[in-house]
Image: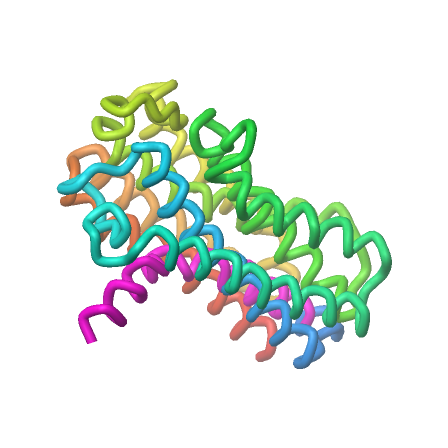
Amino acid sequence: MKRLLCWIEAMRLRTLPVSIAGVVYAAALGAATWHFSLTPWLMSLFFALLAQIASNFANEYFDFKAGLDRPGREGPRRGVTEGDISPRAMLWATFLTLGMACSIGIALVALYGEWWMYVVGIVTALGAMAYSTGPYPLSRHGLGEVAVVAFFGVVPVCLTYMLMGGPWGWWLFASSVGIGLMGANVLVVNNYRDMDDDLAVGKRTLAVILGRRAMLWLYVADGFLAGILTFPGWLAVSRIGFVFPLLYITIHVALSVRLASGRGRALNPLLGMTAVLMLVYSCAFLVLSVM
């Protein structure tokens, strides 16, 4: 049981709402425009979840190998660093999970997509690894937040919607960026919390590069911009839709105050709250879209 709990912890459950939210938001767009299709949506959901878990496993393994995770860190326990999971087992789990995601992605595009979607899928799979390893690991060069906007906003929202038969449009791209910014805020909290640990081991996250004050303002700005970019979609499905982006921004401001006053492990719940707020926002949009 203890070993199982270690693996569950390595999946980083607090962050998984980020991958779910983008696919749920795409479902809402599909429902609102009569393009929802259950099978490609479910396949997209499983692909997104498995790709994120693979990325989380890879991050734990490669950060351990690079000496960037230390026992007793401020964030949640890292099973490999603490000796609960062997590095070899984590590496195998990474490739197995990524392989499962790729298998679903190949079948998904073959059944419902177009050839260029294979390219996006390959880039997404490489991105899951490039976040933590390779010649230029994104997480160690201040590009983690940009990667989240792309791979947890633009890709899942746009591709899931289009795989269900929906058309491309700038409104689709704008809303996908908005969802991506919500996801990026989860990483902002993570890097804000780990700033001292990362600075000590030479890991150049965006928080290390910019500092706490700038990251706090980035968190605030991301939330407001996300609300603005997704605002038209809410108005399109309901005359009272404007209430929900305003409610999101209100809660976001409250979380920003908590971020400004917290440090270290005290921010772990805030990371989960930021991710759950993103998922609740997408689910609320889905409910309103089908009403």
Residue at 22 percent of width and 50 percent of height: 76
Examine the rendered structure and indicate whether residue 154 appears above or below residue 279. above
Judged left or right of residue 268, residue 55 is right
User: Quadrant of residue 47 in the image?
Assistant: bottom right
Judged left or right of residue 187, residue 287 is right
- What type of secondary structure mainly makes up the magenta span? helix
Examine the rendered structure and indicate whether residue 99 appears above or below residue 183. below
x and y percent of residue 195 in the render? 26, 29
x and y percent of residue 225 in the render? 51, 38
Of the 4 image quadrants, the one containing the C terminus is bottom right
Q: Which residues are magenta?
A: 1-30
Q: How many marks?
A: 0
Examine the rendered structure and indicate whether residue 288 appears above or below residue 265. below
Residue 23 belongs to magenta span: yes
Residue 151 belongs to magenta span: no
x and y percent of residue 238 in the render? 59, 66
